[in-house]
Amino acid sequence: MGWGVLAGLLYLGLPYLLVQRLGLGLIREGRQRTRELALTFDDGPDPATTPAVLDALAQAGGRATFFVLLPLAGAYPELLERMRLEGHEVAPHAVEHRHAWIRTPRSAYLEPVRAARRLQALTGRPVRLYRPPHGAYTLATLLGLRRAGVVGAHWSVEGGDWHPASTPESTVRHVMERVYPGTVVVLHDAGPGARNTVPALPMLLSGLKERGYGLVTLSELDGAEPLGLGGLPRRGVGLLDDLFDRLGDIRRVAGRRDTIFRAGLVRFPLPAVALSSAVQLAHGARAIEFHVNNPLLVDLGVRRSLRQARQDLRLLAQDIRADPEWRQAKAVFCISALRPLLESLGFETHPIPASSHRRLSLWATVLRRAYKTPVREAPQPVLSVLSMERFLERYGGGGLVHGL
C-alpha cells in the first residue's frame, strides 16, 4: 500500500467509517424511552421560506434546532432573534457551504472554528453544536471541532426533501415511516429542500402529533450525547438488525420504525409442534415470525414495552389481514428469551432443540452486553407461538377467513 493511499484512508476513510457512518463522537439520536424527537433544519435562514417553517412550528407548539449559514445569519439577524424568542436552538452549519472532502485541510480545519465564532458574535451566546455541510468529516474537520469546542451533530433520519424526485407528500411519508422516539430528523428551511419542506411541514407536524411525539431542540432531547466507544456495540447490533431485515425480507410492523416488532413470512424452522388450539404446526409450514425492536424494548423497560406491544400486535394483525400470502400462514411465533413478556400477551410456550438453544443463548448474551442489561441468570430461549386463528381472534378483532 502506497503512502498516498494510506494517507487518504487516515484523512478520509477512517472519519467516514467511524464518524460519519457509525457516529463515533457525534450526536445522532437520543434515548427511546420518551416519545419525543428533534427536528433540525439546515441551510437557512431565508426570509422567503424560514418564516413559514417558524409559523408551522409555532402553530404545532414545537421547538427545533436550526443549523444556519453564517452569511445568511448575518444578513437576517431578525430571523435569528425570532428563533430565539420562540424557543428554538440556533447552531452553525457553515461559513461556506462546501463538502469537507473538496476542501484543503486548512480550510476544513478552520471552517467549524470560524462558523462557531461568527455565530457567537451574532447571538452573544455560547455555541455547543456544529453540523458540517452534507454531514461530511475529514481528519481536519474533527481537529477543527476540538479547536472550536463544539460537538458534531448528525442525524438518524434524513428527510430527503432536497432530492429532485421528492414531493411534499413523499417527504412526509419518508419521515413518518422512519421516525422513532429519540430520532434526530434533518430537513431544510432554505435552499432546494425548502420547496418540499415548507408545504410538507404542517402535514408532518400533524402526523407526529397524532402519534404522540413531542418536538424538542437537539440539546433538550433525552440522552442526546456524543456516541462514545461504550455505545458502539449497541450501534453495531442495530446495524446488524437492519442487515438481517434486508436479507430476510423482514418488515417493520405497520411499515414504521417506532413499533416494537418486526415480522416476516418464513418456513417454520423447528420440529413439528402441537399447539393447544389443536393445530399441528409442521416443520416447514408457512408461519409469521416476529422479532423484537431491541433498542426500543430496552429503553422503554418491561412495563411500558408490554403496553406498546399490545398495540403493536394489533398493527401486526392488520398487516396480516392486508397481505394475501401472510393470511395463509399457520401461526405467529417468536423464538426468544422473552417468555414472561410474551406469555402475558397470550402466547403459549414450547421448548426448543438444544442446537437452537445454544445459538440463541449466545446471541442473547451479545444483546445484553451491547445494551448493557446484565442479569444474574440469563432467561432461556423458548418458542412463543399462537395459531393464526387464535392470534387474529385476540388481536385482529375476529378469526381468520381464508381467501379474503
Image (cartoon, rainbow, N blue to C red):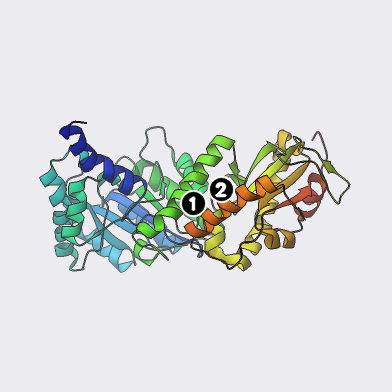
Q: Is residue 393 left or right of residue 240?
A: right
Q: Identify which residue, 308 or 82, lies in the foreground.
A: 308
Q: The disc labelled 2 sits on which kind of residue?
A: Arg
Image quadrant occupied by the C terminus:
top right
Image quadrant occupied by the N terminus:
top left
Badge number at residue 113: none
Q: Is residue 134 visible?
A: no
Q: Position of residue 166 (x, y in %)?
A: 42, 36
Q: Residues within 10 Å of mark 2 (few under 14, many from 20)?
A: some
Q: Residue 103: name its quadrant.
A: top left
Q: Is residue 250 left or right of residue 314?
A: left
* Count of numbered tags: 2
Badge number at residue 256: 2
At a point 25% along the width and 46% down the height, the residue shown is 137
**Contact (CB < 8 A) between labels 2 and 1?**
yes
Q: Secondary structure at mark 1?
A: loop
Reading the chain from its start, which is encountered first: label 2 or label 1?
A: 1
The residue labelled by disc 1 is: 179
Q: Is residue 350 visible?
A: yes
